[in-house]
Image: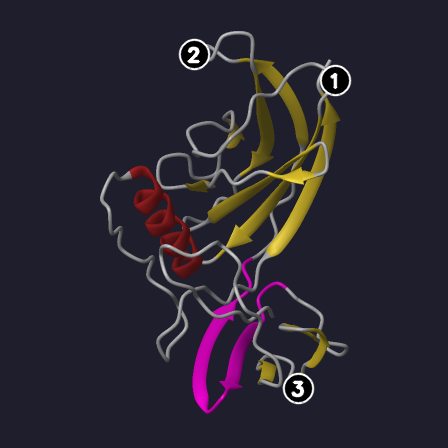
Amino acid sequence: VTITKSVNFNQDNVYPTVSSAIVVITDHTANVTDTLKETTPGNYNTSLLIGVAGHKYSLYVNASSNVFTASCTMPQSVTLDSLYTQLSSFRGNNYQVVPAYTDPPVLGNYYHFVEIKNDSLMSAIYIRNDNLVNGQKITQPLSGGGGGSKIIPGDLVVIYLECIDSAIYQYYYGLQQSENQNSASPANPVSNITGGCLGYFSAHTSSSKSIVVP
């Protein structure tokens, strides 16, 4: 869990860390509770909990007498079957990464993709649901996320496929919409954390593969 303070719009994007908070995560399915330890300023880690698909987790934070709570159930895992690249049809001599995976037969799966190129985290937001492709094998290139970078031969690309719940999908969708609009004061994405804050609490699975663009 990472806790920082926001800054004014006209300030640099350097967010002050919040130390000495009480951070508690509970696995309600396993009936296990852990008070996290602050390992570096603003970063709190568990030494007891392990994420398990299907388990329900809750978060409790007390930071300077401000209390924040959230809950999330970890979805079942969907793993990446393979990863390959293809030439983009709309960005010239540029490649797109194509993650291949099989959506489960039960409707209601939500996905978030994380892209790392040459050890740098890309800011593009890639999210999907299975409303129109339920139970199918998916081979859709990652595109249209905003903040993506040009991929050329020789690049090392790592893709993480995260299975997220509907609340986290809506958070990323709201964030994506805010980034795409031209308003001077875009709306904040809807958080699943109560107490009045930015951010989210997510219990999700993760599967990754890497590829060197030929």
Looking at the rendered image, the disc whose residue lies closer to the viewer, 3 or 1, is: 1
- Which sits in the foreground, 177 or 163? 177
Find disc 3 in the rendering and name its residue. Answer: 35
Q: Looking at the image, is 169 positioned above or below residue 114?
A: below
N-terminal label among 3 and 1: 3
Specify whether residue 70 is painted magenta: yes
Where does the C terminus fall, quadrant-wise? top right
Total residue callouts: 3
Given contact means CB atoms under 8 Å apart, are the residues at marks 2 and 3 in contact? no
The CA distance from mark 2 to mark 3 is: 49 Å
Q: Is residue 66 toward the left or the right of residue 58 in the image? A: left
Residue at 48% over, 38% down: 135
Q: Which residue is mark 2?
A: 90
Identity of the residue drawn at 37% across and 50% down: 175
Q: Earlier in the sequence, mark 1 or mark 2?
A: 2
Q: CA distance from mark 3 to mark 1?
A: 44 Å
Q: Residue at x 55, y 41 (%)?
A: 113
User: With respect to residue 47, does 207 lie above or below?
Assistant: above
Q: Which residue is mark 1?
A: 154
Horizontal relation, residue 212 to residue 94: left or right: right
Q: Secondary structure at mark 2?
A: loop
Which quadrant, please, contains the N terminus?
bottom right
Question: x, y percentage for residue 17?
Answer: 58, 71
Label 3 CA crowd tier, 10 Å (few <14, some 14–19, many 20+): some
Q: Amino acid at mark 1?
A: Gly
Front residue of this view, candidates 152 and 13 = 13
Q: Position of residue 95 (x, y in %)?
A: 58, 16
- Res 122 → quadrant: top right
Q: Residue at x 71, y 70 (%)?
A: 50
Mark 1–mark 2 Cα distance, whole angstroms, equals 21 Å
Write down the region rendered in magenta: 53-75
